[in-house]
């Protein structure tokens, strides 16, 4: 992973669960292509489903990596299931809750719940579930780039007071 | 748990892990050749079997672990007699006889049929009991 698709780690229970969030902004260029205005209709900027899966993969990947002391690289290997109920619009915040369901030397599985906080609503709504498989591989050369991005994320999350995040060291 | 009950649960596990219709999961179907399993699917199957049957499966216990990298077991792209013997010993649930007459490495996947997975779970549950 060379780019961050989550803004903050909200909480960490090592080896159990990690929660993170991502604020959706209309300044993200891809939203202007997904979907642009057509002749008959105005633009409809909604978060592409694969990027919602990417957010869960980053939350889950951090949970899995932390569980083994970040000694291996953790790569997304399979999307077991992704069941998302509605479109997510700019201004909303995605909350990813990744729960570790299995882990061994070869890889891990994670069950994820996605909730959406939208300022137009009274409270959060469940968007759906995402189940992922990760593989453990030997650390690669470009892992350094990922580590830098992670350090920034962890530092910001510690400053924000994320529960259990302070002990998360790469 | 009877063998029929084990077979039913194994069918559920494989259909879910490989996103296929349960009707395709017949005892003689091979995981890679007939059901389209890829490498990460084997780990998925292990995790799902652990959950479905409340078992702990060690790495290399259900599917071979690094056996093929050992020069004693593989020569010129084929399993040697030692290699076949090691497979029989380590993986008694697998259907090694399917490749004995032509033990090319590329055929190793054929020993893992649906029936082989059922055999594995049956042995494992028997050992637990």
Image: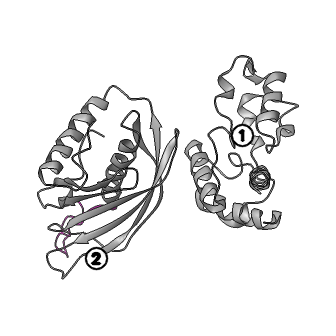
In the image, B3: left or right of B16?
right
Asked if labels 2 and 1 touch by Cβ distance under 8 angstroms, the answer is no
Judge if badges 1 and 2 mark residues of a common chain. Answer: no
- Label 2: few (<14), some (14–19) or many (≥20) C-alpha neighbours in 10 Å: few
Q: Residue at x 72, y 29 (%)?
A: B105
Query: Which span of residues is magenta-colored?
Result: A34-49
**Residue B119 shows in the view:** yes
The residue under the point 68% across, 35% down is: B64
Is the N terminus of chain B in the top left, top right, bottom left or bottom right quadrant? bottom right
Residue A40 vertical placement versus B34 (above, below): below
The C terminus of chain B lies in which quarter of the figure? bottom right
Q: Position of residue B101 (x, y in %)?
A: 88, 31
Give the quadrant of residue B15: bottom right
Disc 1 residue crowd, few under 14, some 14–19, many 20+, Cα 10 Å: some
Name the subunit of mark 1: B
Residue A60 placement (x, y as % from top left): 37, 52
Q: Secondary structure at mark 1?
A: helix
Would residue A85 appear left or right of A132 to someone viewing this image?
A: left
A32 or B8: nearer the eye? B8
Q: Secondary structure at mark 2?
A: strand
Q: Is residue B74 left or right of residue B42?
A: right
Q: Quadrant of residue A116?
A: bottom left
Q: Is residue B69 magenta?
A: no
Chain at numbered mark 2: A
Above or below: residue A74 compared with residue B22 = above
Observer-nearest of A127 and A103: A103
Q: Residue A107 appears at what percent x and percent y?
A: 49, 43
What is the C-alpha distance between the residues marked 1 and 2?
A: 45 Å
Per the rendering, the mark at residue B109 is: 1
Q: Which residue is mark 2?
A: A125
- Count the marks: 2
Q: Residue at x 26, y 64 (%)?
A: A95
């Amino acid at each position: 992973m060379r780019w961050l698709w989550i803004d903050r780690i909200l909480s960490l229970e090592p080896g159990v669960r990690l929660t993170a969030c991502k604020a959706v902004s209309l300044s993200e260029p891809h939203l202007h292509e997904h979907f642009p205005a057509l002749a008959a209709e105005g633009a409809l900027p909604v978060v592409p489903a694969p990027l919602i899966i990417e957010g869960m993969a980053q939350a889950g990947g951090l949970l899995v990596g932390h569980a083994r002391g970040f000694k291996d690289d953790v790569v997304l290997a399979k999307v077991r299931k992704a069941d998302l109920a509605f479109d997510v619009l700019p201004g909303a915040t995605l909350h990813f809750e990744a729960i570790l369901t299995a882990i061994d030397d070869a890889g891990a599985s994670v069950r994820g719940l996605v909730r959406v906080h939208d300022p137009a609503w009274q409270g959060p709504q469940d968007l759906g579930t995402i189940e992922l498989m990760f593989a453990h591989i030997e650390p690669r050369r470009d892992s350094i780039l990922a580590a830098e991005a992670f350090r920034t994320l962890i530092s910001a999350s510690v400053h924000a007071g994320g529960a259990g995040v302070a002990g998360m060291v790469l | 748990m009877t063998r029929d009950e084990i077979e039913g649960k194994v069918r559920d596990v494989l259909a879910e892990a490989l996103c296929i219709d349960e009707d395709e999961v017949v005892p003689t179907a091979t995981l890679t050749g007939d059901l389209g399993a890829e490498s990460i699917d084997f780990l998925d199957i292990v995790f799902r079997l652990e959950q479905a049957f409340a078992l702990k499966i060690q790495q290399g216990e259900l599917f071979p672990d690094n056996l093929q990298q050992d020069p004693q077991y593989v020569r010129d792209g084929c399993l040697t007699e030692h290699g076949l013997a090691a497979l029989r010993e380590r993986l008694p649930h697998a259907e090694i006889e399917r490749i004995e007459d032509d033990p090319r490495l590329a055929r190793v996947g054929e020993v893992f049929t649906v029936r082989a997975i059922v055999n594995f779970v049956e042995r494992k549950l028997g050992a637990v009991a």
